[in-house]
Image (tube, rainbow, N blue to C red):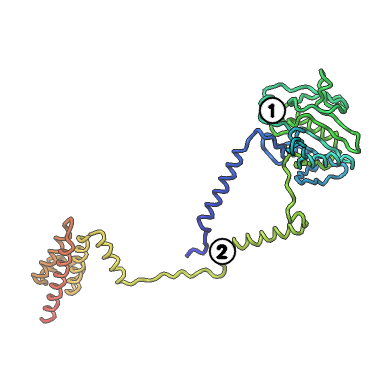
Amino acid sequence: MNSKRSLPPFVYGLLGLILLACALLTVGQSDNAMSPAADSYEPAGTRAFAELLAKQGYKTITDRSRKPEIRPGDLVIAFHKTEADGLEFVSRGASNKPQETPEEAVYKRVIASTKGGANVLVAELPVDFGKVSQQITGSEPQRFSNTLSGEVLSILTDEGTSLEPEVPVWVPPSNSANALVQVDASASGTIAFVRSPVPFTNRFIDRADNARFALSMVKMLAHPGARIIFAEACWSNAVDKGLFATIGQWALLGYYQVLFVLALVIITANIRFGFPDELRVEKRGTRALVDAVGFTLRRGRRTQTAVSVAADRLERSIRSTLRLPADASAQEVDRFTSDDLKEALRSLRLASAEHRVASSAALSLIVSAQERFDEWVTSRQGT
C-alpha cells in the first residue's frame, strides 16, 4: 500500500494555468511604454544601472511609496513625465482646469527634499520609448564635454526635452546652449536635470560611454557609499503600503509565520506518520485457482485446452490407481484398463488435437470420461 497521497489532479492543472498566464503576460508586454523600473530587465528598465551602482558601493533602494523616505545626503533618481503627461485637465463648465496627478505630487515632494540636504537626479521620460529607440539605434553617439571637470564622453542619446536655463554641465562642443544636463544648486541640495533617460536604460547603458556618463552623474551628486533612492512613484509605479507595513515590521513577521505554518500543514497532510501499514494480501485456495483457470479458458473459448487438461488428469489418475511407475508405457496402461475407459481417453486426445471444439461437446466428453473412470475403479474394487 502506498503511504503517500498525491495532490488532486486539478491542483496541478491550476498551477499550469498560472504559469501559462505569467508567460503570456511577460511576452505580451509592449516595448513602447517607458517603464524605467529599477528591478526590470526590459529594454526600458534600469536594472543594469542599479546593479552598476551597487557594484560601485552605493546602497540602492527602490521606493514605490507616495511619500518616499528621503534623508539628508541621499540621492533621489526621479524619472519624471513631461508636463503634458503629468497634468490632467478636468472639464468644469466652460473652462478646463488642470488637476495635479498623484505622480506630480510625488515629484514635487522629491524636489522639495533638496531643502533638507538631499540631491535629486531628474530625467524626463519620452512618450514612446519604442519610437525613440528606433531613431537612435543606428545613429552615431554625440560628444559632450563636462564644463566642471573637462571630461569628454561619447554619449548615445536622443534629443529629449528642452531644459530650463540653469547651469549647464554636459554640453556639446558645437552648441553649448543645447546642454544634456543642467544643474540647479539654489537650495541646500542639488538638482540635476537630464533631458533624456535613454543613457540609463538597459538597452543603451552599454552603448558608447553611456555607463561612464551615468556613473559620473551619480558621483557628482552623491558621496561614496550613499543611499541611491529610485523614486518610482514619480512615473506611475506607486504601491501604497499595505496593512502589515502600516502596523509595523513585527506584523509582517507574524504574517510570514502564519504562511509557514499553513505550508507545513499542507505538506504534512500528504505524509502519514507512525508505523507503516502492514501489507495484507488475501490468500486464495485451490478452488479459487481452478475457478480462475476455468474462467480464463471459457472467455478465450479454449475448449481444446480444457479437453487436453482433462485427458492428462485422467491418465494420471489411471496410473495412480494402477500404481505404475512414471516411466511406464501406454501399452502397459492399456493392459489393465477397460475398453470403455480406453475409448473415452482416446476421444479426449483426439478432441484436444482439433482446432476448435464446441463447449457442449467438450463438456460431454469430459463427463463421459469421468464416468467411465469411476465404473472402472468400482469394477476393480469388486474383484
Q: Residue shown at 89%/38% (left/top)?
A: 189
Q: Do the residues labelled 1 and 2 touch (CB within 8 Å)?
A: no
Q: Report the front residue among 88 and 227.
A: 88
Q: Where is residue 118 in the image (x, y as percent from the top left)?
A: 87, 40
Q: Position of residue 146 (x, y in %)?
A: 84, 25
Quarter occupied by the C terminus: bottom left
Q: Residue shown at 12%/67% (left/top)?
A: 344
Q: Mark 1 points at which residue?
A: 132
**Could you tell me how many numbered marks the image carries?**
2
Q: Residue shown at 56%/45% (left/top)?
A: 20
Q: Report the front residue among 43 and 289.
A: 43
Q: Report the front residue among 344 and 302.
A: 302
| Residue 233 lies in quadrant | top right
Q: Is residue 350 above or below residue 69?
A: below
Query: What's the amino acid at mark 2?
Result: Ile
Q: Residue shown at 77%/24% (left/top)?
A: 154
Q: Mark 2 points at which residue?
A: 271
Q: Position of residue 238 (x, y in %)?
A: 73, 44
Horizontal arrangement in the rendering, residue 90 relative to residue 169 (left or right): left
| Residue 347 lies in quadrant | bottom left
